[in-house]
Amino acid sequence: MEKAPAKINLSLDVLHKRDDGYHDVEMVMTTIDLSDRIELQQLSKDEIQIALESRYVPSDERNLAYQAAKLFKKTYQIPNGVRIQIEKNIPVSAGLAGGSTDAAAVLRGLNRLFHVNAPLKDLAKLGSNLGADVAFCVYGKTAIAKGFGDQIEMLPSPPNCWVITARPDIGVSTRTIFERIELQHLQHPDTKKVLEALQKRDFYQICISLGNALEDITFALHPEVNRIKNAMLQAGADGAMMSGSGPTVFGLVQHFSKAQRIYNSMRGFCEDVQLVRILG
Ligand code: ATP
């Protein structure tokens, strides 16, 4: 079994648009204890099967886990097939990298299953062909991703704390948000301050340094995301921010009893609220 944890962004900045149309980003990310579970089984025939029960995720070649297996098989010339069973716990199109972490887990899992022993660096490079968050998800833990998300530098983990995620019942397409970027109007986060806070393992500095250049764009399209962020802070979260391109908002809290109170109060605002540990 391969665990595929969700990520949250401690910062997300968009630096500029490249000639190929993609944006160069700078994202500090960490993993949380909200995971999909991936079981891999070798098949003698050359076939990739996906088994999952989800109304929102396709179980054919559109699934990122399928694409990861196809790419892995081709790159390392694996003649066998594989059955991939996905227990989906991470909400879909939520800004928590659900698809990317499944793809990354498939790369790690197949690497073991077929005794390829490729270093994580190679798997991350492979994964970056599938999506901007896959390289990070191959490593997990805490890291800064630059370029198209493909350049990864590991960072110290944040101090232990609790994470409350709250997701309104809307899907936000990352592409739609990126298409609306007007670079001159972005509110850039202070990434350096986040890095400093992580180096010092200073929880409160992390909380006040959180920043996401995409928040204003998503807030303009979906004001309820902004309302959830305000509610999270009003309920007493030490820090709160939208993850990725949204719509999930997360709150960071150091003490469990307070985290529980915030969790209960956020459940009045939206249906999908979770209280989990940071993994980092
Ligand atoms: P990110 O934070 O990386 O932008 P996200 O959390 O916003 O990602 P995902 O949950 O990865 O978004 O889903 C985005 C799209 O990818 C959905 O349309 C979904 O159908 C598709 N998809 C393909 N494979 C998967 C998978 N294994 N799990 C979830 N979504 C998948």
Image: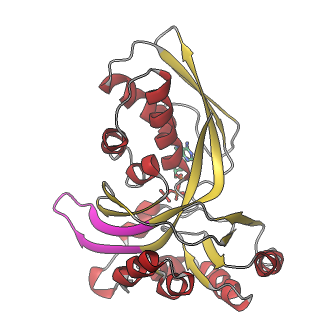
- Which residues fall within the magenta stretch? 12-28
Using residue 50 as the reference point, say whether residue 77 is left or right of it.
left
| Viewer can see residue 62 | no
Where is residue 202? Give x, y as percent: 52, 82
Where is residue 29? Give x, y as percent: 46, 65
Q: In the figure, 90 relative to 119: above or below?
A: below
Q: Nearer the viewer, residue 42 or 194?
A: 194
Q: Residue at x 23, y 72 (%)?
A: 16
Q: Residue at x 51, y 48 (%)?
A: 101
| Viewer can see residue 203 | yes
Where is residue 63? Give x, y as percent: 51, 38
Q: In the figure, 40 relative to 233: above or below?
A: above
Which residue extends farthest bottom? 234
Using residue 74 as the reference point, say whether residue 61 is left or right of it.
right
Q: Residue at x 47, y 83 (%)?
A: 216
Q: Main secondary structure of the magenta part?
A: strand
Q: In the figure, 117 relative to 144: above or below?
A: above
